[in-house]
Image (cartoon, rainbow, N blue to C red):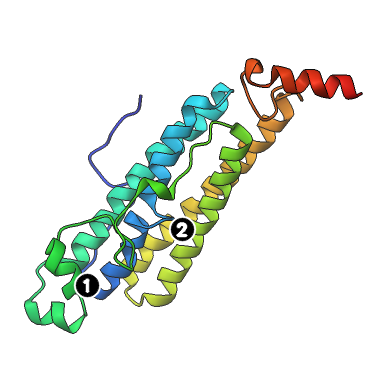
Amino acid sequence: MFVYEKKLQYPVNIKKPNPKLAKVISSQLGGADGELAAAIRYLSQRYTMPLPELKATLTDIGNEELNHVEMIGAIMYQLTKGLSVEEIKKAGFEDYFVDHTTGVYPQSAAGVPFTTAYLQSKGDAITDLHENLAAEQKARTTYDNILRLCDDPDVKDAIRFLREREVVHYQRFGEALRLLTDKLDEKNFYAFNAEFDKQCFILNSNKK
């Protein structure tokens, strides 16, 4: 299905630990608008997409989001590697540490564990693509907020790369939506099993 390379999509080389920043960045691993939710969302939605081009787009972007999960994990690991108890206390990292030590765990910055309730796979191509356009913008905003809070150039470098990819994904989903609306006719614009809507179409035709 795809080729896995044993390297990050973009290098992460953080020199200075910062557990407080790691806790903030955790939202892009396990938060509502994070990379894990995006990967599962797109790789689930692809099955019901009516056009091969759309299936390919969702497969490619979904797999790239898995790369981004790896990058966020690497950032969190490097920001918490080798911490002393004093550093943990000083950064207010105790609540995370007591449950996970310095393991990488998918949760939001507020400490809410990841849940699939964050994502949607509706089975309607128009609805799902609009969902994805919104998801990419929310992820971009989260990265903007992280950049506002971050003063480490090594972290900002990787976060800027991830932010740029959200913008690219938004553009790709916009292209997919335009392709979809160009190719689908009025009878399969929203649903893709005529049996579901046969009675509805008959009633609408009689009214004309």
Quadrant holding the C terminus: top right
Q: Nearer the viewer, mark 2 or mark 1?
A: 1
Q: Is residue 54 above or below residue 171?
A: above
The picture places residue 199, in percent across and down from the top left corner, at 72, 19
Extreme residue toward the right, this view? 208
The picture places residue 150, in percent across and down from the top left corner, at 36, 75
The type of residue carrying mark 2 is Arg
Q: Which of 203 and 118 is in front in this view?
A: 203
Q: Residue 163 carries which label?
A: 2
Q: Is label 2 in a helix, a strand or a loop?
A: helix
- Of labels 2 and 1, earlier in sequence is 1
Q: Which mark is residue 19?
A: 1
Left or right relative to 4: residue 38: right
Q: Is residue 170 above or below residue 54?
A: below
- Mark 2: give few (<14), some (14-19) or many (20+) Cα within 10 Å: some
Left or right relative to 76: residue 150: right
Residue drawn at (25%, 44%) of the image: 7
Q: Is residue 61 above or below residue 19?
A: above
The picture places residue 58, in percent across and down from the top left corner, at 48, 34
Quadrant holding the N terminus: top left
Q: Is label 1 in a helix, a strand or a loop?
A: helix
Residue 151 visible here: yes
Residue 11 visible here: no
Left or right relative to 35: residue 204: right
**Which of the 4 image quarters holds residue 126?**
top right
Residue drawn at (11%, 64%) of the image: 101
The picture places residue 3, in percent across and down from the top left corner, at 31, 29
**Which of the 4 image quarters holds residue 11?**
bottom left
Left or right relative to 87: residue 206: right
Q: How far apart are marks 2 and 1 (CA)?
A: 21 Å
Residue drawn at (24%, 62%) of the image: 76
The type of residue carrying mark 1 is Pro
